[in-house]
Image (cartoon, helix red, strand yellow):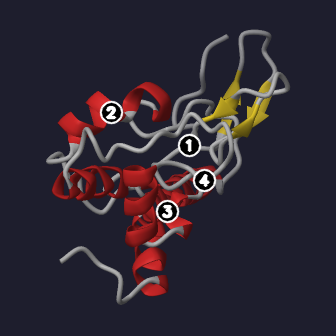
Amino acid sequence: MAKKKGNTSNKKENSQGITKKSHPLKPLITIGFLTLGVGFYFVIKAIYTLYIMPIDDDKSGWPLYQKYCASCHGLSAEGQDIRQPKGGTYPDGSFIAPALNGLGNSWLSSDEQLFIKIKKGSTIPNSPMMGFEEQLTDEGIYLVIGFFKSKWPALTRQIHENRFPNIQKE
């Protein structure tokens, strides 16, 4: 079927000869969706920055963390079982090492409490979290704490600092 010359209407004919009229607002709707998409990107980026992205990436404690902590708490401090970031026990009674990346509950403890737990071990009976006072110096323990705190989301780190304002490493 031949097209008529000079036809500037918004009608289109498909292969079966059926004429469809395109919506006059289609370009505006497309631009609207693109704008929403860009806006959504910036909202997700802001959420990532506030809740997910670590404040910094303190690598100075990484070698010690890798040597003494990663076998239980994971290479990225994600914990032994990502389904249970706060740790706990499996049905067989074995312990689950918690995440230290801010998804667990380590941020609920002061730096001093974290230091004591790493140095002396867990106070929970039969916990595999042993003390590391023979393996790590005090400075080494603070380096490890600095490493996993650098994995905390920015907002978690800020809440921790506000909750424990007077307890900071010298």
Q: Earlier in the sequence, mark 4 or mark 3?
A: 3
Using the image as rendered, state which of residue 27 and residue 132 is in the foreground. Answer: 132
Q: Earlier in the sequence, mark 4 or mark 1?
A: 1
Is there a contact, CB below 8 Å, between mark 3 and mark 2?
no
Report the number of numbered marks: 4
What whole-number distance in Å separates the C-alpha atoms at marks 2 and 1? 74 Å
Q: Residue at x 56, y 43 (%)?
A: 8
Residue labelled with disc 1: 8
Of the residues tagged 1 and 3, which is closer to the observer?
3
Of the residues tagged 4 and 3, which is closer to the observer?
4
* Relative side of 31 to 22, left or right: left
Q: Position of residue 42 (x, y in %)?
A: 44, 62
* Relative side of 14 to 26, left or right: right
- Check disc 4: other Cα within 10 Å, few if <14, some if 14-19, many if 20+: few
What whole-number distance in Å separates the C-alpha atoms at marks 4 and 1? 81 Å
Is there a contact, CB below 8 Å, between mark 1 and mark 3?
no
Kindly identify which numbered label has been placed on residue 123.
4
The amino acid sitting under disc 3 is: Tyr
Mark 3 element type: helix
What whole-number distance in Å separates the C-alpha atoms at marks 3 and 2? 28 Å
User: In the image, is residue 114 above or below residue 68?
Assistant: below
Kindly identify which numbered label has been placed on residue 65.
none
* Relative side of 161 to 143, left or right: right
- Check disc 2: other Cα within 10 Å, few if <14, some if 14-19, many if 20+: some
The amino acid sitting under disc 4 is: Thr
Q: Earlier in the sequence, mark 2 or mark 1?
A: 1
Furthest residue in direction right, as rendered: 91
Kindly identify which numbered label has been placed on residue 68.
2
Q: Quadrant of the C terminus?
A: bottom left
